[in-house]
Image (cartoon, rainbow, N blue to C red):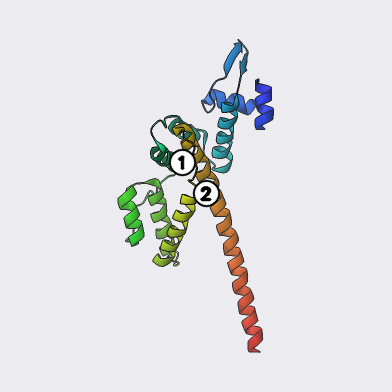
Amino acid sequence: MQLSELSRQSRVPVPSIKFYLREGLLHRGQPLSPRTSAYDASHLRRLELVKILIDVQGLSVAGTRKVLEAVNTATIDEAASIRLGVAALSADRVGPQNPQESAPPELVSELGNRHGMDDPNICALTQALDTAVKAGTPVDPATLTLAWELLVKLAAATLTDLPADPTDAAEHVVIGTAIHDRLISALWFLSRREAAERLVANRAGSICQGR
């Protein structure tokens, strides 16, 4: 297919596709003439991944390029592809600039020992916990452990039936990680609102019964 058809099928404007080509986010097509190239299904898949990374995950062009470079180097096995896919997205996170001020919960220490305390996600986790303490709303360790156990089960459920090709597997993991990041965040806000509304309703009912 030519550029106009690639644009139509991917729902990505031609100027954006040309920009992605210039920035190395999309591989070149097969030259047909000095001004025309042919594109195939691999370009459609890559454009979908680029859209998810930029529009859903909110990565910068530079961050997206790092993820794509990591995906393109996935040539080992399924386990390595999973680790690489998750690590590629994590690399765009920025850790806290200040050292941790309070002792981390046991769970965080265990995760830090396994993944390294300088892991971007461990840094983000410790920063969030420190912020909660400073705000006077410390996170209960039992609640943190419950959240971790539930998320481990959810993560395992999303890693079934991975493609056999390592590059395809890494791409699958990247897409799934990015989408579920937004999905879990949206469900969290909705659940908090619903829990608050139920709490208010229950308190109002208790007041009415006491009169």
Q: Position of residue 145 (x, y in %)?
A: 41, 62
Q: Position of residue 53 (x, y in %)?
A: 54, 38
Q: Position of residue 92 (x, y in %)?
A: 45, 41
Query: In the displayed image of the protein, which residue is found farthest to the bottom?
Result: 211
What separation in Å lies between label 1 and label 2 (alpha carbons)?
A: 11 Å
Mark 2 lies on residue: 181
Residue 208 falls in which quadrant of the image? bottom right
- Count how many numbered circles sit on residues in the image: 2
**Quadrant of the frame with the N terminus:** top right
**Quadrant of the frame with the C terminus:** bottom right
Earlier residue among tags 1 and 2: 1
- Can the viewer see residue 100 in this picture? no
Residue at figure coordinates x 45%, y 64% from the top left? 135
Secondary element under disc 1, as helix, strand or loop, is helix
* Disc 2 crowd, CA 10 A, few/some/many (<14, 14-19, 20+): few
Residue placed most toward the observer, 204 or 71: 71
Q: Position of residue 31 (x, y in %)?
A: 58, 13
Three-letter residue code for mark 2: Asp
Residue 175 left/right relative to 73? right
Residue at figure coordinates x 65%, y 86% from the top left? 209
Three-letter residue code for mark 1: Leu
Residue 41 left/right relative to 85? right
Image: 132 above or below 115: below
Residue placed most toward the observer, 61 or 106: 106
Mark 1 lies on residue: 89
Q: Check contact, mark 1 vs mark 2: CB within 8 A.
A: yes
Numbered label attached to residue 150: none
